[in-house]
Amino acid sequence: MGIDAVALVGLGSVLSAGIAVGMGGLAALGEGKAAQQALASMVSQPDMANDVRSTMFVSMAMIESTAIYALLVAMILLFSNPIFNKVVELAAQ
Amino acid sequence: MNLSPDQIIFWIKHFSLFGREWTFNLNMTIVGTWLVMLLIFIGARLATKNLKDGLKINRWQNFLETIVSWLKGEVENVLQRKSKFIFPIIASLFIFVLVSNLSGIIPLPFYSPITGEWAVYIPPTGSFSTTIALTLVVMLAVPAFGIARNGVIGYLKRYIEPQLIMLPFNIIGEVSGGASLAIRLYGNVMSGTVIVAILLILAPIFMPVVMQLFGLLTGVIQAYIFATLGLVYIVAGLGDPSLKEKKEWESLKETS
Protein backbone atom coordinates (compact mmCIF):
# COMPACT_ATOMS: atom_id res chain seq x y z
CA MET A 1 0.00 0.00 0.00
CA GLY A 2 1.57 3.23 -1.11
CA ILE A 3 1.19 6.89 -0.36
CA ASP A 4 -1.67 7.09 -2.90
CA ALA A 5 -3.99 5.02 -0.76
CA VAL A 6 -3.25 7.21 2.30
CA ALA A 7 -3.94 10.36 0.27
CA LEU A 8 -7.16 8.89 -1.11
CA VAL A 9 -8.47 7.84 2.29
CA GLY A 10 -7.51 11.23 3.76
CA LEU A 11 -9.23 13.07 0.93
CA GLY A 12 -12.33 10.92 1.33
CA SER A 13 -12.52 11.51 5.08
CA VAL A 14 -12.12 15.28 4.82
CA LEU A 15 -14.63 15.57 1.99
CA SER A 16 -17.21 13.41 3.71
CA ALA A 17 -16.73 15.34 6.97
CA GLY A 18 -17.56 18.53 5.07
CA ILE A 19 -20.59 16.94 3.43
CA ALA A 20 -21.79 15.58 6.79
CA VAL A 21 -21.65 19.02 8.43
CA GLY A 22 -23.34 20.62 5.44
CA MET A 23 -26.16 18.09 5.46
CA GLY A 24 -26.50 18.38 9.24
CA GLY A 25 -26.90 22.11 8.79
CA LEU A 26 -30.17 21.39 7.02
CA ALA A 27 -31.64 20.71 10.46
CA ALA A 28 -31.65 24.51 10.83
CA LEU A 29 -34.55 24.59 8.35
CA GLY A 30 -36.65 22.42 10.62
CA GLU A 31 -35.63 24.41 13.68
CA GLY A 32 -36.55 27.67 11.99
CA LYS A 33 -39.94 26.29 11.13
CA ALA A 34 -40.51 25.15 14.72
CA ALA A 35 -39.48 28.56 16.09
CA GLN A 36 -41.69 30.39 13.58
CA GLN A 37 -44.75 28.34 14.46
CA ALA A 38 -44.07 28.62 18.19
CA LEU A 39 -43.70 32.41 18.00
CA ALA A 40 -46.89 32.71 15.96
CA SER A 41 -48.86 30.68 18.50
CA MET A 42 -47.31 32.59 21.42
CA VAL A 43 -48.48 35.87 19.88
CA SER A 44 -51.97 34.63 19.14
CA GLN A 45 -52.37 32.97 22.57
CA PRO A 46 -50.15 34.69 25.17
CA ASP A 47 -51.75 32.66 27.99
CA MET A 48 -50.22 29.48 26.65
CA ALA A 49 -46.77 31.05 26.11
CA ASN A 50 -45.05 29.08 28.91
CA ASP A 51 -46.37 25.70 27.74
CA VAL A 52 -45.50 26.48 24.14
CA ARG A 53 -42.00 27.58 25.10
CA SER A 54 -41.09 24.47 27.08
CA THR A 55 -42.50 22.17 24.39
CA MET A 56 -40.61 24.14 21.75
CA PHE A 57 -37.32 23.72 23.64
CA VAL A 58 -37.79 19.96 23.87
CA SER A 59 -38.74 19.55 20.22
CA MET A 60 -35.92 21.85 19.12
CA ALA A 61 -33.43 19.71 21.01
CA MET A 62 -34.81 16.63 19.28
CA ILE A 63 -34.49 18.29 15.87
CA GLU A 64 -31.02 19.51 16.72
CA SER A 65 -29.85 16.02 17.68
CA THR A 66 -29.69 15.08 13.96
CA ALA A 67 -27.31 18.01 13.40
CA ILE A 68 -25.31 16.88 16.45
CA TYR A 69 -25.02 13.36 15.00
CA ALA A 70 -23.65 14.85 11.78
CA LEU A 71 -21.17 16.97 13.74
CA LEU A 72 -20.08 13.93 15.74
CA VAL A 73 -19.49 11.90 12.58
CA ALA A 74 -17.49 14.78 11.09
CA MET A 75 -15.38 15.11 14.25
CA ILE A 76 -14.63 11.38 14.33
CA LEU A 77 -13.68 11.49 10.63
CA LEU A 78 -11.34 14.43 11.20
CA PHE A 79 -9.71 13.78 14.57
CA SER A 80 -9.88 10.07 15.38
CA ASN A 81 -10.62 8.29 12.13
CA PRO A 82 -10.19 4.52 12.67
CA ILE A 83 -9.92 3.68 8.94
CA PHE A 84 -7.31 6.37 8.32
CA ASN A 85 -5.21 5.16 11.27
CA LYS A 86 -5.38 1.59 9.94
CA VAL A 87 -4.32 2.69 6.43
CA VAL A 88 -1.41 4.71 7.81
CA GLU A 89 -0.35 1.66 9.85
CA LEU A 90 -0.48 -0.57 6.77
CA ALA A 91 1.41 1.99 4.68
CA ALA A 92 4.16 2.21 7.29
CA GLN A 93 4.86 -1.53 7.04
CA MET B 1 -6.80 16.43 19.96
CA ASN B 2 -8.73 15.03 22.92
CA LEU B 3 -12.28 14.17 21.91
CA SER B 4 -13.07 12.83 25.35
CA PRO B 5 -11.75 13.21 28.91
CA ASP B 6 -11.36 9.40 28.92
CA GLN B 7 -8.07 9.87 27.08
CA ILE B 8 -6.47 11.87 29.90
CA ILE B 9 -5.23 9.22 32.32
CA PHE B 10 -3.76 9.90 35.76
CA TRP B 11 -3.19 6.40 37.10
CA ILE B 12 -3.25 2.88 35.68
CA LYS B 13 -3.73 -0.32 37.67
CA HIS B 14 -3.48 -3.80 36.15
CA PHE B 15 -5.00 -6.70 38.03
CA SER B 16 -6.39 -10.16 37.35
CA LEU B 17 -9.86 -11.25 38.39
CA PHE B 18 -11.90 -14.32 37.36
CA GLY B 19 -8.91 -15.58 35.37
CA ARG B 20 -8.77 -12.51 33.13
CA GLU B 21 -6.53 -9.48 32.96
CA TRP B 22 -8.26 -6.18 33.68
CA THR B 23 -7.06 -2.62 33.49
CA PHE B 24 -8.36 0.19 35.62
CA ASN B 25 -7.77 3.70 34.29
CA LEU B 26 -8.21 6.60 36.67
CA ASN B 27 -9.06 9.16 34.00
CA MET B 28 -10.35 12.71 33.84
CA THR B 29 -13.98 11.50 33.61
CA ILE B 30 -13.81 9.86 37.05
CA VAL B 31 -11.85 12.69 38.67
CA GLY B 32 -14.19 15.26 37.10
CA THR B 33 -17.24 13.36 38.36
CA TRP B 34 -15.75 13.35 41.87
CA LEU B 35 -15.15 17.09 41.65
CA VAL B 36 -18.71 17.75 40.51
CA MET B 37 -20.08 15.49 43.25
CA LEU B 38 -17.96 17.34 45.81
CA LEU B 39 -19.16 20.70 44.51
CA ILE B 40 -22.83 19.67 44.72
CA PHE B 41 -22.41 18.04 48.15
CA ILE B 42 -20.56 20.97 49.75
CA GLY B 43 -22.89 23.51 48.11
CA ALA B 44 -26.00 21.71 49.30
CA ARG B 45 -24.65 21.20 52.83
CA LEU B 46 -23.64 24.85 53.19
CA ALA B 47 -26.95 26.09 51.80
CA THR B 48 -29.06 23.90 54.07
CA LYS B 49 -26.97 24.44 57.22
CA ASN B 50 -29.32 26.86 58.95
CA LEU B 51 -32.70 26.64 57.28
CA LYS B 52 -35.18 29.24 58.37
CA ASP B 53 -38.91 29.73 58.21
CA GLY B 54 -40.61 33.01 57.47
CA LEU B 55 -39.81 36.04 55.37
CA LYS B 56 -36.12 36.49 56.15
CA ILE B 57 -34.12 33.59 54.76
CA ASN B 58 -30.54 33.61 53.60
CA ARG B 59 -29.75 33.92 49.93
CA TRP B 60 -28.50 30.35 49.38
CA GLN B 61 -31.66 28.89 50.83
CA ASN B 62 -33.65 31.19 48.58
CA PHE B 63 -31.65 30.06 45.55
CA LEU B 64 -32.15 26.35 46.28
CA GLU B 65 -35.83 26.82 47.08
CA THR B 66 -36.32 28.55 43.74
CA ILE B 67 -34.65 25.69 41.84
CA VAL B 68 -36.43 22.92 43.71
CA SER B 69 -39.89 24.47 43.54
CA TRP B 70 -39.48 25.20 39.83
CA LEU B 71 -38.32 21.62 39.18
CA LYS B 72 -41.20 20.22 41.23
CA GLY B 73 -43.67 22.25 39.20
CA GLU B 74 -42.16 21.06 35.90
CA VAL B 75 -42.14 17.41 36.96
CA GLU B 76 -45.69 17.49 38.32
CA ASN B 77 -46.91 19.15 35.14
CA VAL B 78 -45.86 16.11 33.12
CA LEU B 79 -46.52 13.48 35.77
CA GLN B 80 -50.15 14.37 36.65
CA ARG B 81 -50.24 11.86 39.51
CA LYS B 82 -48.79 11.27 42.95
CA SER B 83 -45.33 9.75 42.98
CA LYS B 84 -42.72 9.42 45.68
CA PHE B 85 -39.61 8.38 43.80
CA ILE B 86 -39.74 9.92 40.32
CA PHE B 87 -39.08 13.52 41.35
CA PRO B 88 -35.82 12.78 43.28
CA ILE B 89 -34.41 10.77 40.33
CA ILE B 90 -35.21 13.43 37.75
CA ALA B 91 -34.06 16.26 40.01
CA SER B 92 -30.73 14.59 40.76
CA LEU B 93 -30.12 13.91 37.08
CA PHE B 94 -30.92 17.55 36.27
CA ILE B 95 -28.71 19.01 38.99
CA PHE B 96 -25.77 16.72 38.21
CA VAL B 97 -25.90 17.41 34.46
CA LEU B 98 -26.39 21.15 35.07
CA VAL B 99 -23.46 21.54 37.47
CA SER B 100 -21.28 19.37 35.27
CA ASN B 101 -22.08 21.35 32.10
CA LEU B 102 -21.56 24.68 33.82
CA SER B 103 -18.29 23.55 35.44
CA GLY B 104 -16.76 23.57 31.95
CA ILE B 105 -15.99 27.29 32.30
CA ILE B 106 -13.64 26.71 35.27
CA PRO B 107 -10.10 26.68 33.84
CA LEU B 108 -8.55 23.92 35.96
CA PRO B 109 -5.16 22.58 34.87
CA PHE B 110 -4.34 18.90 35.47
CA TYR B 111 -0.98 17.17 35.28
CA SER B 112 -0.96 13.60 34.00
CA PRO B 113 2.11 11.66 35.20
CA ILE B 114 1.47 8.86 32.66
CA THR B 115 1.91 10.99 29.54
CA GLY B 116 3.88 13.75 31.30
CA GLU B 117 1.59 16.43 29.84
CA TRP B 118 -0.66 19.13 31.19
CA ALA B 119 -4.34 18.98 30.31
CA VAL B 120 -7.33 21.28 30.81
CA TYR B 121 -10.38 20.20 32.78
CA ILE B 122 -13.15 18.83 30.55
CA PRO B 123 -16.60 18.44 32.16
CA PRO B 124 -17.52 14.78 32.78
CA THR B 125 -20.66 15.07 30.63
CA GLY B 126 -18.28 15.58 27.69
CA SER B 127 -17.45 11.88 28.00
CA PHE B 128 -19.54 9.21 26.32
CA SER B 129 -19.20 6.88 29.33
CA THR B 130 -20.86 9.35 31.69
CA THR B 131 -23.79 10.11 29.40
CA ILE B 132 -24.34 6.37 28.75
CA ALA B 133 -24.34 5.73 32.50
CA LEU B 134 -26.86 8.52 33.10
CA THR B 135 -29.03 7.19 30.26
CA LEU B 136 -28.88 3.67 31.74
CA VAL B 137 -30.32 5.09 34.97
CA VAL B 138 -33.29 6.43 32.99
CA MET B 139 -33.70 3.33 30.82
CA LEU B 140 -33.67 1.04 33.89
CA ALA B 141 -36.10 3.33 35.71
CA VAL B 142 -38.63 2.98 32.85
CA PRO B 143 -39.30 -0.78 33.31
CA ALA B 144 -38.82 -0.52 37.09
CA PHE B 145 -41.60 2.06 37.56
CA GLY B 146 -43.72 0.50 34.81
CA ILE B 147 -43.61 -2.97 36.37
CA ALA B 148 -44.14 -1.59 39.87
CA ARG B 149 -47.37 0.04 38.72
CA ASN B 150 -48.78 -2.30 36.04
CA GLY B 151 -47.15 -5.66 36.78
CA VAL B 152 -44.92 -7.54 34.35
CA ILE B 153 -47.66 -8.46 31.84
CA GLY B 154 -49.25 -5.03 31.99
CA TYR B 155 -45.90 -3.41 31.31
CA LEU B 156 -44.94 -5.74 28.45
CA LYS B 157 -48.36 -5.14 26.86
CA ARG B 158 -47.07 -1.67 25.99
CA TYR B 159 -44.80 -3.20 23.36
CA ILE B 160 -47.62 -4.81 21.37
CA GLU B 161 -49.73 -1.66 21.22
CA PRO B 162 -51.62 -1.05 18.94
CA GLN B 163 -50.93 -4.37 17.20
CA LEU B 164 -48.57 -7.33 17.55
CA ILE B 165 -46.98 -6.37 14.23
CA MET B 166 -45.64 -3.17 15.80
CA LEU B 167 -43.43 -5.10 18.27
CA PRO B 168 -40.08 -4.64 16.45
CA PHE B 169 -40.76 -0.97 15.83
CA ASN B 170 -41.62 -0.37 19.48
CA ILE B 171 -38.37 -2.07 20.54
CA ILE B 172 -36.34 -0.06 18.00
CA GLY B 173 -38.03 3.11 19.24
CA GLU B 174 -37.11 2.32 22.84
CA VAL B 175 -33.45 1.60 22.04
CA SER B 176 -32.98 4.57 19.70
CA GLY B 177 -34.64 6.85 22.25
CA GLY B 178 -32.05 5.88 24.83
CA ALA B 179 -29.17 6.13 22.36
CA SER B 180 -30.23 9.58 21.19
CA LEU B 181 -30.52 10.73 24.82
CA ALA B 182 -26.88 9.75 25.44
CA ILE B 183 -25.45 10.94 22.12
CA ARG B 184 -27.22 14.31 22.28
CA LEU B 185 -25.74 15.28 25.63
CA TYR B 186 -22.28 13.97 24.74
CA GLY B 187 -22.28 15.64 21.31
CA ASN B 188 -23.35 19.01 22.66
CA VAL B 189 -20.83 19.23 25.50
CA MET B 190 -17.95 17.67 23.51
CA SER B 191 -18.52 19.88 20.47
CA GLY B 192 -18.53 22.91 22.76
CA THR B 193 -15.10 22.11 24.18
CA VAL B 194 -13.65 21.11 20.78
CA ILE B 195 -14.94 24.27 19.07
CA VAL B 196 -13.37 26.40 21.82
CA ALA B 197 -10.07 24.53 21.29
CA ILE B 198 -10.21 25.12 17.51
CA LEU B 199 -11.08 28.82 17.88
CA LEU B 200 -8.17 29.17 20.30
CA ILE B 201 -5.90 28.54 17.30
CA LEU B 202 -7.79 30.84 14.91
CA ALA B 203 -8.77 33.85 17.03
CA PRO B 204 -7.18 33.39 20.46
CA ILE B 205 -8.67 36.19 22.57
CA PHE B 206 -12.21 37.14 21.66
CA MET B 207 -13.99 34.22 20.00
CA PRO B 208 -13.43 31.51 22.67
CA VAL B 209 -15.09 33.75 25.27
CA VAL B 210 -18.16 34.15 23.07
CA MET B 211 -18.35 30.40 22.46
CA GLN B 212 -17.98 29.73 26.20
CA LEU B 213 -20.88 32.09 26.87
CA PHE B 214 -22.90 30.20 24.28
CA GLY B 215 -21.79 26.97 25.97
CA LEU B 216 -23.36 28.17 29.25
CA LEU B 217 -26.69 28.60 27.46
CA THR B 218 -26.59 25.21 25.73
CA GLY B 219 -25.40 23.58 28.96
CA VAL B 220 -28.49 24.75 30.85
CA ILE B 221 -30.83 23.87 27.98
CA GLN B 222 -29.30 20.41 27.54
CA ALA B 223 -29.64 19.69 31.26
CA TYR B 224 -33.31 20.68 31.06
CA ILE B 225 -33.82 18.59 27.91
CA PHE B 226 -32.13 15.53 29.42
CA ALA B 227 -34.28 15.67 32.55
CA THR B 228 -37.49 16.37 30.59
CA LEU B 229 -36.98 13.59 28.06
CA GLY B 230 -36.04 11.13 30.81
CA LEU B 231 -39.25 12.08 32.62
CA VAL B 232 -41.26 11.69 29.41
CA TYR B 233 -39.87 8.17 28.87
CA ILE B 234 -40.64 7.19 32.46
CA VAL B 235 -44.19 8.56 32.23
CA ALA B 236 -44.71 6.74 28.91
CA GLY B 237 -43.66 3.52 30.68
CA LEU B 238 -46.21 4.19 33.44
CA GLY B 239 -49.12 4.58 31.05
CA ASP B 240 -52.17 6.81 31.41
CA PRO B 241 -53.28 7.65 34.97
CA SER B 242 -56.28 5.64 36.13
CA LEU B 243 -59.47 7.27 37.36
CA LYS B 244 -58.46 6.69 40.99
CA GLU B 245 -55.07 8.33 40.47
CA LYS B 246 -56.68 11.29 38.74
CA LYS B 247 -59.08 11.83 41.66
CA GLU B 248 -56.26 11.50 44.18
CA TRP B 249 -54.17 14.00 42.24
CA GLU B 250 -56.99 16.54 42.02
CA SER B 251 -57.76 16.34 45.74
CA LEU B 252 -54.05 16.72 46.48
CA LYS B 253 -53.89 19.80 44.29
CA GLU B 254 -56.88 21.41 46.00
CA THR B 255 -55.46 20.97 49.49
CA SER B 256 -52.04 22.37 48.64
Image: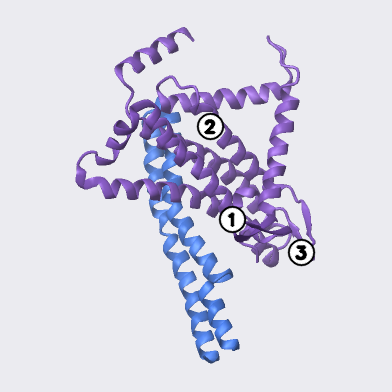
Chain colours: A blue, B purple
> Which residue carries the number 2 mark?
B89
Q: Decide: marks 1, 2 in contact (CB < 8 A)?
A: no
Mark 1 lies on a secondary structure that is loop
Residue type, label 2: Ile
The residue labelled by disc 3 is B114
Q: Nearer the viewer, mark 1 or mark 2?
A: 1
Q: Chain of mark 3?
A: B
Q: How many marks?
A: 3
Query: What amino acid is at disc 1?
Result: Phe
| Residue for point 54% across, 78% down | A86
- Nearer to me, A93 or A83: A93
Identify the secondary structure beneath mark 2: helix
Q: Secondary structure at mark 3?
A: loop
Horizontally, is A67 left or right of B15 in the view? left
Subunit under mark 2: B
Point out residue B202 in the picture as x, y percentages from the top left corner. 67, 67
Q: Earlier in the sequence, mark 2 or mark 3?
A: 2
Viewer-closest of B175 and B70: B175
Whichever of callouts 1 and 2 sits on the residue coming sooner in the sequence is 1
Question: Which residue is disc 1 drawn over?
Answer: B18
Q: CA distance from mark 2 to mark 3?
A: 37 Å
Q: Quadrant of residue B52?
A: top right
